[in-house]
Structures are given as structure tokens and as C-alpha cells.
Image (cartoon, rainbow, N blue to C red):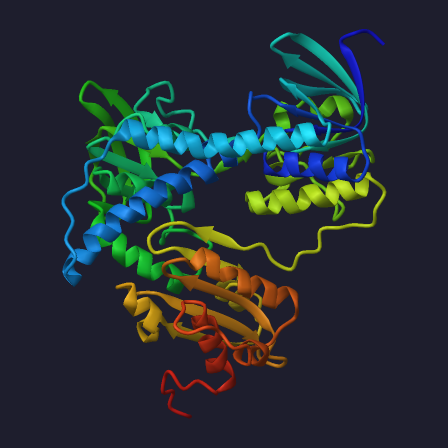
Amino acid sequence: MNDATLHSEVLVLGGGPGGYTAAFRAADLGKQVTLIERYPVLGGVCLNVGCIPSKALLHMAQLIHEAEDVQSHGLKFGKPEIDIDKIRAWKASVSKSLNDGLAGLVKQRKINLVQGTGRFTSKNSVEVETPEGVKTITFDQAIIAAGSHPTRIPSFPNDDERLWDSTDALELKQVPKKLLIVGGGIIGLEMATVYHAFGSEISVVELMDQIIPGCDKDLVRPLQLKIKKQYKNLWLETRVTAIEPQADGLKVSFEGKGAPESDIFDAVLVAIGRRPNGKLIGAEAAGITVNEQGFIPVDKQQRTNVANIFAIGDIVGNPMLAHKAAHEGKVAAEVAAGHKAGFDALTIPSVAYTDPEIAWMGLSETQAKQQSIEYDKAVFPWAASGRSLSLGRKEGVTKILCDKQTGRILGAGMVGPNAGELIAEAVLALEMGADADDIALTIHPHPTLSETFGFAAEMINGTITDLYIKKT
């Protein structure tokens, strides 16, 4: 074996939330681990150009919006002075703190970290292009955690610096006067929230008949009503047919309901989803099955069709969420270490960190209807929540779906401030097999937003006193 060849019991390809979790868990279980990451820092898209920096910017946006909102309650601030350079530096410091923490955990666990781009050369080896040259690493078992990349439309002028993907938007190089968001999903709307707070005139175009397709319409409605007032345009059931670079901006042509034939924007953010990196890792050399979309099929133990190779995270399928990847990473590491483990989570929660936030888990009402599942539903309005009113907010709701026969919780959703924090109780309730009585009989602290979940359960079992519901 030459100097450029290394051997590892477990090799992990990709250092995002799924990859580093898998590497750490495998090391904790006594395996000798090599972790390959193409960038100089760990954390992947989530930590460096996704979840974490976007939440840092969304926090700033929230402060700006709250300062505006409380003026009607008698507390007046001056117009905020926005120092983009300082905000950018602060955002970077948040990511760096977490980067440094991960680097420390790698050293503590004695994981061999290799910076470079890895491609399989067989079912037991990868070739890694590193800054020092090409290295060959052989392995007993491998865990693929190579993630995804933003979807691009080939006909768009992707080399124009005014056409952004989510990574460009998070760089915060400038605040355009007129910004178009193509795609009304979570990523697009979170960026719309940030840039609106910083002063951009926002237009959103979405192909479907609602924003955040896949989420129940009643949960989306409070956000949709709010952004219709805040943003210049919200075009639903509309597509972008062309984007042409011009000296004064990007000329965008539209086709659909209520949209103009064309308009000019200073910048355009394309946020129409992400594509898995399955076709970029030399999977065919290892005999790994990759489907047409670039996903790698796996079983409940995260095992691919090649017995000693596992895959986790965005590359194995939707939803493309960091918390899903981390959970899968632990499963793969445990199976690789000889433990009995499998991915058997009953639900994976989703959160849109917009204003208001939207969070949901389990069976949606749309799915229940499609599957002809009989359910009882309760929707508690936050206008009846003392805590919500004390925040100056009344648009929120908490919804619970329960099985009509057993009363067990099937799904839940919240829209309002901190909905992303509140959904965790609903996830636990579903995983524990709780029914409406269990939740209603659990004493929630008052006054809190969390008690809206308890109130919704009381609506199901008929014990609610905070609302009057006429008996039929």
C-alpha cells in the first residue's frame, strides 16, 4: 500500500449534518472512521449556506418587523440603520462557532478528516481529489452523505450574478431594490422575509395554487394573507417563461394568473427545490443503484443495493431536511457497527421559519382525505390565546387530527410565532401513541403558546372551556 493509500473501517462521504452525525456515532461505537468533506469546514449546506445562516438573518428580520409592529402599541423606535457588512460578519461568526465545535469533536473522536472531492472506484475504495493531490482510500463499509444542490433551469442566464440561488442570497452582497423570488416554497419565502425586512420590494411567483405546496391550505392562509399586504406581488398559478439580462436589470417574462407579460428586477432568486448528488459520486463504479432523479434507494437500515455501502440524507429521498439526515446517520452507523437498528420514525416534522412560522407533522388533512381516513379535527384560534394576544399577534392557529375510532393523534400543525418550537410536543405525542385525552389531561403552563396544543385536544374530547362550542 503506497503513501497515498489509506484504509478505514468506516468511510463517510460528506460532512453535513447526516455525515458528521454518522461519523461521530460510528466512532463512538468503536469504529475507525474516515470522513471526507470537499470544503475546508464541516457542516455541509445546512451549517454554512442553509439552515443556520438563514436563521441568523431571519432573527434580524424578526427584530425589524417587531420594532415596526409595536409602534401601534405605543412603543416607537427610530428607523433601523442597517449595516450589511456587520450583519454579514455576525452571520458568518455564528457558522464559524459551530464549524469550530465540529472540528473539535472530530479531534476528540480521533476521526481521520480528509478534505477533498470523493468518487467511488469500486465497492471498497474511493478516490479523493485533495489540495495535496489524489488519494485512494479503501474501506470495509461506507456511508454516503453527499447531499444535494439547488435546481437550476438551463435556459436561464445562470452565469449572470444578478440571478441567484439560495447560496447567493445568503451571501448578502447587496439588498436589491426589486427582488423576484421564483418559487413559493420554504426556502424562497424565508429569503423573501429577510430581504423584505432589509428594504427590498418583493415579488413572489409560484406555479401551484398556494404557497408552500404540500402544507394544508388552512395552515398556509395566515402567512399568505400577511405577505399579500407586505409584498408588492404574489403571483400564484404562474410560471416564468424566460429571463433575459439587460443593462438595467433582468427582464422576466411570465405566463399565468394576474401576472404581467414581463417586468424588470434588480435580482432574481430561483428557489424551486434541490436535486440529489447521486450521479456525481461515481456510484456506478461501486455498483450502487442510482435512479433517474439522482436518488439512491435504501432499505430501512439505510443500506443500498451494495451490502457494505449505506446512504443517508438528501441523497436518499425527500424530505430534504437536516434532522432527517442526522437520524438516518445514526441508524447507518449503528448498523455498520453491528447493532440492530432501523429507521422507524412515525413522522418527520417540517418547519417554515417565515413570519408567521408554520410547522406540521404526521398526516396532513389533505392526505387524510386522499386516503379516505376518518378523522376528528380541532382548530384552536390563537385569537383566544392570552399569550398570543400579549405578543400582539392573533392570526395563528393550532390544528390536531385524531383517529375517529381510537382518538390517537394522526397529525398536527401550527402557524404563528415559534410554531417550529411548539411542533416538538406533537411529534412526541405521535411517537408515543398519545390520544386527545392524553394531551388534554397534560397540564400546560399558562399563559403560553404551548397550551394551544392542549386546548385543541380539549376541543376533540369535548372538555374545552376557553371556547364555547355549540353541541350538535
Residue 261 vs 75, above or below: the answer is: above
Question: Residue 179 falls in which quadrant of the image?
Answer: top left
Left or right of residue 198, residue 376 in this image:
right
Q: Classify the position of the C terminus by image quarter.
A: bottom left
Question: Residue 430 falls in which quadrant of the image?
Answer: bottom right
What number of labels is visible?
A: 0
Q: Classify the position of the N terminus by image quarter.
A: top right
- Residue at the location (70% across, 34% down)? 23
- Residue at the location (85% across, 42% down)? 338
Find the residue positioned furthest to the bottom. 472
Can the viewer see residue 32 in this picture?
yes
Where residue 217 sits: x, y (%)? 39, 61
Can the viewer see residue 44 in this picture?
no
Question: Residue 433 falls in which quadrant of the image?
Answer: bottom right
Residue 365 vs 152, above or below: the answer is: below
Where residue 236 sits: x, y (%)? 31, 49
* Residue 462 vs residue 205, the one in the foreground: 462
- Residue at the location (21% across, 56% down)? 69
Where residue 170 sits: x, y (%)? 38, 32
Left or right of residue 80, residue 450 in this image:
right
Where residue 214 sits: x, y (%)? 47, 54
